Image (cartoon, rainbow, N blue to C red):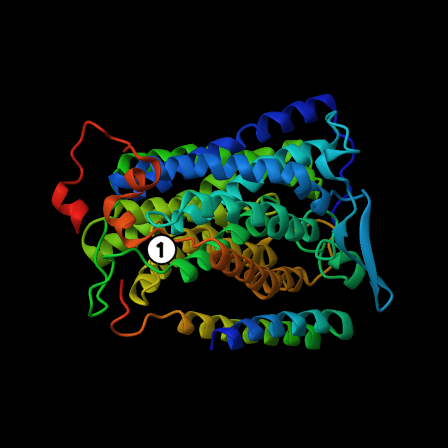
Amino acid sequence: MKIAGILLLLTGWLLVLAAVVLLAAPASRSGFVLAGIGVEILGLVLVFRAHLPLAGERY
Amino acid sequence: MAAMVPALSEVGVALCIFLILLVPLAIAGLALINTGFVRSRSAAHAMLSTLCVVAIAASVYFVCGFAVEGYAGRPMHAISVAGKQWSWLAAEKFFFHGLELDGSPASLAALLQLFGVGLAAAIPLGSAADRWRLGASACAAVLLAGCTYPLFAHWAWGGGWLAQLGVNYSLGRGFLDCGGAGSIQAVGGLNALVMLWILGPRRGKYSPEGVPTAIPGHNTVLVLFGCLLALLGWVGLNSAGAILFTGVAPARVVLIAVNTMLSASASALTTLLITRIRFGKPDASLVANGWVGGLVASCAGCAFLEPLAALLIGVVAGALVTFSIQWLELIAVGDTVGSFSVHGLCGLWSLLAAGLFARVPGAALGQWVAQAVGIATLLGFVLPLSYGLNLLLDRVLPQRVPPEGEHQGMDLHELGAGAYPEFVTYTEESMQR
């Protein structure tokens, strides 16, 4: 889950870069930038979940 | 594009130097806050860690950091993407070679960065306090000052591709970050999150059932005094950064100082109000975090904001700090000082707020998209890079102290002497636990 989250973070960033380079219309560019950030947030949630201590693992 | 800063007048240079010399007060404030928030048995360790990390960060930045970061208008490596130049790395020499330390904007920027990189490196110390080895934190500072920090700072401040978004793709004036909300605060805050993930919470923070217990800091007075000291440092940081990296006139320092003060005040008062309503009494530690969160939130757009907008940004930052600290505690991310919420989240909020509220003269529309691209870069590149580097470091050099070290306290375990030798802060029994 941790690796999947990190990969989603990277994917979201690449989506944002692609939107900036490939799309010229402001509306579609903005939409894809937001979509990329959405993917990153999903990745962040996954990494957070991967670091939740399991029951009995509490410090 | 990053504004090519014209040569400053003699008065401008003097003002800039004065403002830059205020920045160490931000580091001092942060050091006091970090120290006040830890247990008394780790106080000397917390302060010494800050000193060591700042010294190492400045040295590494001198050796190779500036070579990676550079400054707008100076040599840099660029690749061509669909006919546009994307500068991704500076082409400076190591050890400041080729940089005349003569009061030119580039030399002033290098001086500011020596302090800025120290501030960024000191941020994760707050999150990981009470359990992070001194040697490991020093090595992590090397990674931050030599790689993560200068790379992103080049993109945002050194004329890199983020700064060029305005020229290349008509996105406002390009990524806007006057006082280092992204380059310093968010980079430091995301590093703090990485350390939280790697180290885990402090021993004793959670019961076996997962219920968080309060581990109060040992000196709230230090924390609150640190907040006041940090205000001066932040005024210097925001003002000098705005002059050197966005090319605003030195007279705009007045507006920047007003915005910085208003944002911090609004944030602290919001935190005070929320804690008063929720707990019946104001919470001093959360109000202190709210104050610093407001300072951080003022950074990105401070030179281009109306004072009313700065006030609003501070209110949102105060709410963000309060709720995120409590949420992180509930999901067992034991942030000792709240560094990720204060520097990471408020840094990102500051960048977004600059896109929404900043009024940049002569800039094209789409400023918020440029800011969003910067935020995406922090989350999608800087965070994984920091995580990978620190995870690798943890494999080579374990970053967390052993359990007996935590019980004994970092001062005795790592330094062999406590901060307060006259006080009995631990007993034989507690040391044997």
Vertically, is B244 above or below B214? above
Q: Which is more toward the observer, B387 or A8?
A: B387
Q: Which is more toward the observer, A42 or B136?
A: B136
Q: Quadrant of residue A20?
A: bottom right
User: Local crowd at mark 1 within 10 Å, few (<14), some, or many (≥20)?
Assistant: many
> Residue, x 84% and y 69% (percent of image)?
B82
Is B189 displayed left or right of B88 in the figure?
Answer: left
Vertically, is B256 above or below B329? above
Q: Is residue B275 visible?
A: yes
Q: Which is more toward the observer, B432 or B189?
A: B432
**Chain under callout 1:** B
Judging by the rendered image, the residue that carries numbered circle 1 is B335
> Residue, x 47% and y 57% (percent of image)?
B394
Q: Position of residue B356 (x, y in %)?
A: 58, 59
Number of numbered markers: 1
Q: Which is more toward the observer, B109 or B413?
A: B413
Q: Quadrant of residue B42?
A: top left
Is B292 displayed left or right of B403 in the figure?
Answer: right
> Residue, x 37% and y 57% (percent of image)?
B319
Is B402 displayed left or right of B372 in the figure?
Answer: left
Residue kind at label 1, given as amino acid type:
Asp
Q: Position of residue B47 (x, y in %)?
A: 38, 35
Q: Position of residue B290 (x, y in %)?
A: 37, 48
Q: Position of residue A57 (x, y in %)?
A: 28, 69
Q: Is residue B263 visible?
A: no
- SS class, disc 1: loop
Vertically, is B215 above or below A4? above
